Image: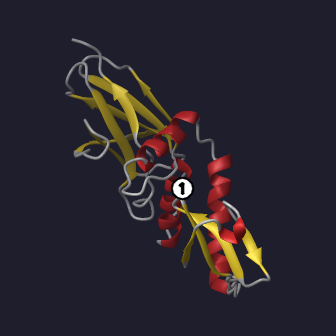
Amino acid sequence: MAKLTGPLMSLDARGSIAQTITFSGWKGLKIARQRVIPANPNTADQQAQRGKMTTLVGYWHSDGYTAADKSAYDLWASTFSTPQSGFNAFIANGMSVLLEGDTWAALTDGTVSNEDASSFDFALDCGADKTYKLYYGCTPTTMLNEVAGVFDTDHVDFDVSGLSASTKYYFYVIGTVADYDHQRTGIYTAETAAS
């Protein structure tokens, strides 16, 4: 890769010349490199992976994820060493679920209620009577306390108590039984009332 100053007698050049040299920008620099046409062997494994990706994108758009659910994924994604979008965090988590051969369960419509000085309730649609735990803490990267959920018809309820007044809590829900133990939500927040 060559660093250029005034490529092609101009201040900026982009694109390819004669199918051999490509001019572009990279981290604020003007560069020229050999043009490479990426290979696409279109193997059965690639097709299977692309199929999983298509399935997960469909889940994101049609499984009923609310604005609060998507914001929770955005918050989770912001904690990664290389920040990304909540959509990317959802897809990455979904790929781990599908690659492990786990059963997909949409965890949607997360709703915080009954916030007082020492507790709050959280309900999450899950569609299946499985065991889920809620992990919470005072930062989005340290959530060590846990509460077991109670399944009711098509959702799971959590009663989070013993909290400090006037404190913002961060929490997520994850499956804890085989076939559901890779599926999790993003990071939600709840704030306790003043005492």
Element class at badge 1: helix
Query: What's the residue type where badge 1 is placed?
Result: Asn
Where 127 sits versus 152, above or below?
below
The quadrant in which residue 189 appears is top left
Task: Determine whether, in the image, residue 37 is placed left or right of residue 77.
Answer: right
Where 117 sits versus 8, above or below?
above
Q: Furthest-top residue in view?
A: 195
* Residue drawn 22% across the image and 19% down it: 165
> What x and y, as percent, mark residue 53?
63, 65
Q: Furthest-right residue in view?
A: 18
> What x and y, as percent, mark residue 126?
51, 45
Residue beneath label 1, please?
A: 88
Instruction: Confirm whether residue 153 shows in the render.
Output: no
Which quadrant holds the C terminus? top left
> What x and y, as percent, mark residue 76?
41, 47
> What x and y, as percent, mark residue 14?
71, 66
* Residue drawn 35% across the image and 56% down it: 176
Q: Residues within 10 Å of mark 1 (few under 14, many from 20)?
A: some
